[in-house]
Amino acid sequence: MALIEAVSVALRQGDALLLVKRGRAPSLGLYAFPGGRVEPGETLIEAARRELFEETALRAAHLEHLRTILLPAEGDNGTPHYSLTVFLGENPSGDLQAGDDAAEAGFFTLAEMASLPITASTFDAARSILS
């Protein structure tokens, strides 16, 4: 099975990062960085900017590659299914508003994230950014 290309954006504002509560699978009901699948013909950075805007109505002036993670599908036996490229951004512009498949959106500190239902890969990345 070929890996599905996906992106997410860790958007920083001070000592907090932007998270969305997933309104659809994968990770339904969990908090994660905004993101999703790369559409045909898109570069990873174009997909990251599109997903960020669709899910939060925010833009980032600059995005830089943070890490790429191989993730299994939900309920899978651990076989990589997604290649998730995470970008780091700062200085958001726009008015925050949850949209597309994001049920909620907000900026959270690491301490606040510790009490949220959050994906392990998101919390791990957040810890490396904010610690």
Image: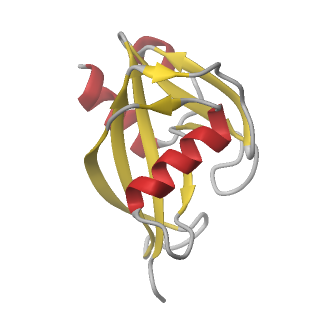
Image x and y of residue 102, in percent: 71, 39
Q: Looking at the picture, does residue 51 appear above or below residue 96?
A: below
Colour convention = secondary structure
Q: Residue at x 50, y 16 (%)?
A: 108
The number of discs equals 0
Q: Residue 9 or 59: which is nearer the viewer?
A: 59
Which picture quadrant has residue 126? top left
Indicate the quadrant where residue 90 lies.
Answer: top left
Q: Quadrant of the C terminus?
A: top left
In the image, residue 80 sits, relative to residue 52, either above or below, namely below
Compare residues 121 and 54 and report the one nearer the observer: 54
Is residue 71 in sight in this rendering?
yes
Q: Going by the image, does 27 lie left or right of 125?
A: right
> What residue is drawn where x is 46% and y is 55%?
46
Q: Is residue 48 left or right of residue 68?
A: right
- Residue 53 at what x, y percent from top left? 60, 39
Q: On the picture, is 117 further left or further right than 126?
A: right
Near-viewer residue (89 or 32): 89
The foreground one among 55 and 120 is: 55
Residue at 57%, 69% in the rendered image: 39
Residue positioned most to the bottom: 1
> Residue drawn at (70%, 56%), measured in percent from left and top?
25
Residue 114 appears anywhere in the view: no
The percent coordinates of residue 6 (x first, y second) are 48, 62
Residue 86, x across and y down, in percent:
36, 48
